[in-house]
């Protein structure tokens, strides 16, 4: 089920940022485990995703930092590269 969900989320992100390239998408899982799975999905496709998007991880303090694989993030911000 998770690959299907990640695929659906990725398609929604791509469509939204194509229409609204100046906006950001904030996303996080409904649980810490699902947020970790999103982090892993981003990390597994990092090279490709960095070609298309700027991605930040949101720390527990609410601070956006450039996404790094295995970072301890509570959420993510994504913006289309220009």
Image (tube, rainbow, N blue to C red):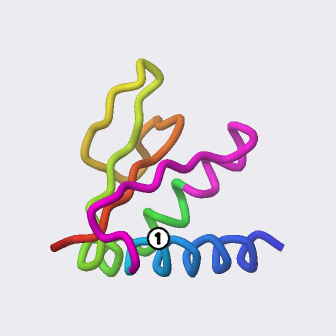
Location of residue 33 in the rendering, given as x and y in whole percent from the top left corner: 71, 44
User: How far from the left and from the top, in percent, is residue 62?
Assistant: 41, 24
Seen as rendered, the residue at the extreme right is 1
Q: Nearer the viewer, residue 62 or 18?
A: 18
Residue 73 placed where, x, y %? 47, 37
Left/right placement of residue 37 relative to residue 51 reads right
Please report the residue visible at 27 percent of the width from the left and 38 percent of the height from the top: 65
Residue sitting at 58 percent across and 57 percent down? 38
Q: Is residue 3 above or below residue 59?
A: below
The residue indicated by pointer 1 is 44
Tell me if 72 is positioned left or right of 53 in this view.
right
Q: Position of residue 70 (x, y in %)?
A: 43, 47
- In the rendered image, the quadrant that contains the N terminus is bottom right
For the C terminus, the quadrant is bottom left
User: As rendered, which of 18 and 40 lies closer to the eye?
Assistant: 18
Instruction: From the viewer's side, name the closer residue of 47 and 61.
Output: 61
Q: Is residue 35 above or below residue 4?
A: above
Is residue 64 part of the magenta span, yes or no?
A: no
> Furthest residue to the top?
61
Q: Quadrant of residue 22?
A: bottom left
Number of numbered discs overlaid on the protein picture: 1
Q: Which residues are magenta?
A: 19-38
| Rendering quarter of residue 17 | bottom left
Left/right placement of residue 52 relative to residue 41 reads: left
Q: Secondary structure at mark 1?
A: helix
């Amino acid at each position: 089920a998770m690959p299907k969900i990640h695929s659906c989320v990725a398609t929604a992100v791509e469509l939204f940022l194509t229409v609204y390239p100046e906006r950001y998408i904030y996303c996080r899982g409904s649980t810490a485990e699902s947020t970790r799975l999103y982090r892993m999905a981003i990390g597994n496709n990092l090279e490709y995703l960095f070609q298309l998007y700027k991605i930040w991880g949101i720390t527990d303090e609410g601070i956006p930092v450039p996404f790094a694989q295995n970072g301890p993030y509570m959420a993510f911000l994504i913006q289309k590269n220009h």
